[in-house]
Image (cartoon, rainbow, N blue to C red):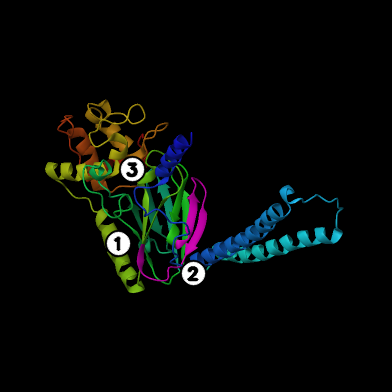
Amino acid sequence: MMKHVRKLIAVLVACQIPSGFAEWQLNLSPAATEIGRDIHSLHMTIFYICVAIAVLVFGIMFYSIAKHRKSLGAEAKPFHESTLVEIIWTAIPLLILVAMAVSATKTLMAMYDTETSDIDIKVVGYQWKWSYEYLSDNPTEQIKFFSTLTTSNDAQRNKEEKSEHYLLEVDNPLVIPVGKKVRFLFTAQDVIHSWWVPELAVKKDAIPGFINEAWTRVDKPGTYRGQCAELCGQGHGYMPIVVKAVPEAEYLAWMEKQKAQQAAQNTVTQLSHEELMAEGKAAYEKHCAACHQVSGAGIPPVFPSLIGSKIVTENIDEHIRIVLYGKSGTAMAGFGEQLTLTELAAIISYERNAWGNNTGEFIQPKDVKAFIDNQNNGGQQ
C-alpha cells in the first residue's frame, strides 16, 4: 500500500514542476514608479502583519494542544467569560485594522489622483489590439495610432524560433517621457478589455461606453511590457502592451516624427498591382489572419472562409463596405478607423486575388476614399 502511495506522491510532485523557472515569481513585479513602490510597501507591510498574527495565534494554539493534551493527564477546567479579555481581544484587532486602513487609504488616494497631468492619452481596446491617442487642445498636435502584435504566425505555430519577447512585441509601442505625469483615459470599442502593465502599477478595465482613469510617472528610461488582463475573446492572448519611457528630448523628437508620418498617411498614392498584393498580404496577416487564417479558410461558422466567397469575388462595393464598417450581428469588426487608405485598398485587393480567387480586380486608395466620401455625403452603407 505504501509503495502505491509513494508513487502517487511522486507523480503529483512531478506535475507541479514547470519546464522552466522563469515564472516562479512569488511577489509583485519590480516597480518603475513611485506609486508602484508605495503599493509594494503597503502590500509587504500588511503581509508581515498577517504573518505575525498567524505565528502568534497558531503558536499559542499548537502550544496549548501539545502542553495540555489528555495523554499528559490534563483536564478541562470550567471557566466563565471575562469582560476584560473580551475588550482586549476586540480592541487589539480593531487598532490593527485602523492602522492598516490609514496606510491603505493614503496609497489609494494617490492612485486615484489623476489631476494636474502633463500628458493625456486616450487608450481604446479593440479585438484584438490597442489604439493610443495623444490628446491636445490643438487638433494639429493630436496623434493617434494602433499598436498590434508583431509575433509572426509561424512563430505562434512553432514553425520558427520564438523571440525573446514572444507574444509581447508590437509594431507601435506607447512612448511617454520620463518624469512626467501621464493620465490615461480607458475605454473600448467592442467588449471589455483590461490594460495592465505590472511595472507601472497600472491595471484598468476598458469598458465600451465608459471612461476609466489612471496615471503613471516613470522614474527612469526603459521598456515595460504588459497584456490585456480581461478575457476578451479568442484573440485575448494576442494583444500585448509595450510602453517605452524615454528622456523628454527624445520624446519630443518622436512626436515630431509621428506628426510627419500621420500627415503622410493621409496622402493618396497610386500603387501597382504587385505593390497592392505585397502590401495586402502583410496587412492581411497582421490584421485579419487571427480570424480568417493565413490561408483564407476562416473558422466557420463564426469567421467564414474567404476562398471563393461571394463577398470577395462578386460585389466589390459590398466588400469595401464590410471591411470599412464591419457587419452588424457578427464578430466582423470595422477597420475604417484602424487602417490607412493604402492598407484598406491593399487588403481588399489581396483578398480578391489571393487563394485562387483571381478576380483581376484591384482598387486604389483613392477608390476607398471616394467610397468613404460617398458614405459621408449620404450614401447607403
- For marks 3 and 2, the one nearer the N-term is 2
Q: Say left or right for 286 vs 34.
A: left
Residue 305, placed above or below residue 137: above
Q: Residue 34's mark?
A: 2
Dot 1 amino acid type: Gln
Specify whether residue 36 is in view.
yes
| Magenta highlight on residue 62 | no
- Percent across and percent down for residue 173 are 33, 58
Query: At 44% across and 36% down in the image, what residue appears?
Result: 3
Label 3: how many Cα within 10 Å (few below 14, some 14–19, many 20+) = some
Element on which disc 1 rests: helix
Q: Say left or right for 96 vs 161.
A: right
Q: Give, as a single range, the part of the protein colored magenta.
A: 200-223
Query: At 33% across and 73% down in the image, what residue appears?
Result: 249
Dot 2 amino acid type: Glu
Dot 3 amino acid type: Phe
- Percent across and percent down for residue 287 are 29, 43
Of badges 3 and 2, nearer the viewer stands 2
Q: CA distance from mark 3 to mark 2?
A: 38 Å
- Depth check, front residue: 273 or 168: 168
Residue 335 location, quadrant: top left
Q: Quadrant of the C terminus?
A: top left
Q: Which residue is mark 1?
A: 258
Specify whether residue 114 is in view.
no
Label 1: how many Cα within 10 Å (few below 14, some 14–19, many 20+) = some
- Percent across and percent down for residue 320 are 28, 36
Q: CA distance from mark 3 to mark 1?
A: 21 Å
Q: Say left or right for 125 vs 287.
A: right
- For marks 3 and 1, the one nearer the N-term is 1
Residue 58 location, quadrant: bottom right
- Depth check, front residue: 345 or 288: 288
Instruction: Confirm or deny contact between disc 3 and disc 1 (CB under 8 A).
Output: no
